[in-house]
Image: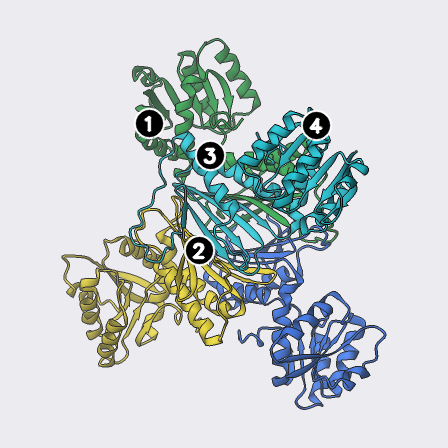
Chain colours: A green, B blue, C yellow, D cyan
Amino acid sequence: MTRVAVLGAKGRMGSTSAAAIEAADGLELVAGIDVGDELEAIAEAQAEAVLVFTTPDVAFDQARWCLERGIHVVIGTSGFGDEKVAQLREIVSGHEGVGALVVPNFSIGAVLMMRFAAVAAPFFESVEVIEMHHPDKVDAPSGTAVRTAELIAEARREAGSAALPDATTTDPDGARGAKVEGIPVHALRARGFIASQEVVLGDPGEIFSIRHDSSSRESFMPGVVAALQWIPEHPGVTVGLDEVLELD
Amino acid sequence: MTRVAVLGAKGRMGSTSAAAIEAADGLELVAGIDVGDELEAIAEAQAEAVLVFTTPDVAFDQARWCLERGIHVVIGTSGFGDEKVAQLREIVSGHEGVGALVVPNFSIGAVLMMRFAAVAAPFFESVEVIEMHHPDKVDAPSGTAVRTAELIAEARREAGSAALPDATTTDPDGARGAKVEGIPVHALRARGFIASQEVVLGDPGEIFSIRHDSSSRESFMPGVVAALQWIPEHPGVTVGLDEVLELD
Amino acid sequence: MTRVAVLGAKGRMGSTSAAAIEAADGLELVAGIDVGDELEAIAEAQAEAVLVFTTPDVAFDQARWCLERGIHVVIGTSGFGDEKVAQLREIVSGHEGVGALVVPNFSIGAVLMMRFAAVAAPFFESVEVIEMHHPDKVDAPSGTAVRTAELIAEARREAGSAALPDATTTDPDGARGAKVEGIPVHALRARGFIASQEVVLGDPGEIFSIRHDSSSRESFMPGVVAALQWIPEHPGVTVGLDEVLELD
Amino acid sequence: MTRVAVLGAKGRMGSTSAAAIEAADGLELVAGIDVGDELEAIAEAQAEAVLVFTTPDVAFDQARWCLERGIHVVIGTSGFGDEKVAQLREIVSGHEGVGALVVPNFSIGAVLMMRFAAVAAPFFESVEVIEMHHPDKVDAPSGTAVRTAELIAEARREAGSAALPDATTTDPDGARGAKVEGIPVHALRARGFIASQEVVLGDPGEIFSIRHDSSSRESFMPGVVAALQWIPEHPGVTVGLDEVLELD
């Protein structure tokens, strides 16, 4: 049984996670901390792992506080780029046996989609990405779509794949969408979607597609639980769920 | 039994149609004419209806030739816009009982998709169009996608529908696609597609979609046959398959 | 402004509808009645239309009570078959100007799907229905899928369509699904679906599909609102949303 | 440059393959053999690898003939089960450096779909398989669907996954389809499909799907070419394209 505390327990992800942790095998929720609470409560509750969903301005220092006390962290706060990950590595290097797992996307479905898209991409002549979100989203394309296109482009470069065929010479209004490292990305914004994405691959006489439709925050919970179950046995700094899911 | 001649019999659509006519109820193929042949052969074969698939530069005069002899025409040649249709009306008005049917799209599936999209559009808050074609296509978006978006926009205007919700403020690379009369249109170009289109409509808590995938010229044949079976009983000038299919 | 009362106001559909009525143009919520409340409250609130979501055992008598007082009813309670509809006609015939609308399915998306499927069915050689629901559903196929198949079968009979082609001679485990009036119906039960359905139609070289995905009760609200806005101007007894949506 | 001969060169797969081999990097077509030709022509043409698409009754002996002469074989003939594979191993063990590759399915898309389905299956609560074929197919479900379900079931057993949730108690006509090792499999038969399959996986709040649509024999050619390019460097007996595609 791993004793787990949640940082940012009153936020949407934090509160949904608390319920999932309580229902999960091998995890025990021992503390829920939010703005105004003392971090000391984590130590008092003898938490062994902390799930961090606080805002970017405080999350790093809170993670450091935990790691320095030998408490594992799973970080769901966004914005942990290369620089912060390097700093985490430094902190962890001084505390044997402690683990930090940075998770840009807790959706196992999204992680599998990206992985499968990258594996499949070199086998097909064509590949495009379509992402569909609710119309209140302010940016296009989505971060997941960009990351997917980057992984596809990288896989094709490594495999020596040819450029995508495209004879388009007339497209006055931009129907062909955005290009992310050469991969076309299309963004739909329609009421009724929460977060969906489809990767479409094509060869002569065949179409292969991978699609993920997420309709609620619940869909992140299996990823949250898997991360917390995994971290106690995996010291060091890890980025992404791929290793947790043993996709590598 | 309607005696049918094909003009442009050696072209791709003409030759595929000849086989379909021979297999169809109530139609009899009596002549196949192509470049170098005399139109007189149509009269000699006592054709009652002529299917026109010749090039735009000759198709109009050939249609006139037929109509003036009391022979019905079904015109599949592209580029018969408002002006030419008006001219056809003039010709037909002088020849009682003769019919001309101009068909921009023989695909019953495409016609149904456009019709259903227009009917459904006012009932949903959001609507977008995705068209998928082979990567040798030079223009984007496709003519069918543009026509679909126009019909959707017209239906929403008539119903007094609100503008589509879209909070996008950041889209540096154009992932949101083209706007045709305010309706987003996205064009994919991938090997493996021939001609596909999907109309996606959304409301809170639901997505409604209409999709048509065409993988061969064969898919136009039911429309060709229906047009030829219909024209003998329908004098005057008609545009599109909607009336033939009794969708009006 | 139509003054609306909700019968069964504390149930799931009733409470969701109350919020939708308050937000809708031309409707004013004046009373919410549930078990234990007196119907008299409807009259006292001077309701002009009543939305009925009570249980089958009481809904008919409550509807009669309203109609006899000249109050329109929109009935969402299930189980209003031919017999009860006939009884409603009798009641209504004695009360000029009052209207009763019986709605087996408030989902505009589902109604459109059924309508489009029936219109399209005679134009294609093949047609099958796939419905997808959450795995807690106890019956298969769904009522909507059965109704869709019946409408498809009826449309094909009227059009004189041939039987569906199917060369299957070996299917030991029943992979071909159920047959409803000759139309194959397949039922998926998977976590992540609420209520989805797809109608797949095929001809040589083309596939046409109509799909509806519903992910929340919210998706019924546009149908509830449309029904309540429509009923004051439409005396007599009407069944289904088709006429409300002007699909006939 | 690998010198390739085709056995069964006049059959549909053989003749399509011949064209693909001629167009492929690193392969040279040196002989096309069919019924009535002498195998000796293979040796005379100095073929280094032979693609076998002959009928099951002769394919094994032909493969043995090649292997005993140090010529690699890629076997596309169906029906090479465990017993024949064991016999191939015996033959190959006596001829160092020679390779035999048995390929039940040359479609890279189908191979990827099966692989991805098996990888993803343990991460989701629900999973079902839908296969769609032309209506002239006599058996249901398809061999690929059965194999996919077996791989899914095996992956879930190994991962200790729970049984699929399914509350169905009423399904008088078999809408829930076939069960293959506990995995529901649904078979559609509609004009317009050649060979399609979709694997649908679900968790609370999300649906993940993998789909492959094949519309022509051409779609097998990348797999044929990859197999022929791979075999000269891989002695011994190998089954399936997984290793060729480096998916293992």
Residue C3 falls in which quadrant of the image? Answer: bottom left
Considering depth in this image, is B60 or C122 the residue closer to the camera?
A: C122
Give the Cα distance between marks 3 and 2: 32 Å
Give the residue displayed 22% in from the left and 81% down from the top: C94
Establish whether labels 4 and 3 are both on one chain.
no
Task: Name the residue carrying label 4.
Answer: D233
Mark 1: which amino acid? Asp
Task: Name the residue carrying label 3.
Answer: A108
Q: Nearer the viewer, mark 3 or mark 2?
A: 2
Chain assignment, label 4 = D
Mark 2: which amino acid? Arg
Q: Nearer the viewer, mark 4 or mark 1?
A: 4
Give the residue displayed 73% in from the left and 31% down from the top: D69
Residue B227, given in percent of the width and then of the height, sits at 63, 76
Label 2 residue SS: loop
For the C terminus of chain D, the quadrant is top right
Considering depth in this image, is B112 or A54 the residue closer to the camera?
A: B112
Circle nearer the N terminus (1, 3): 1
Task: Name the residue carrying label 1.
Answer: A25
Task: Name the residue carrying label 2.
Answer: C176
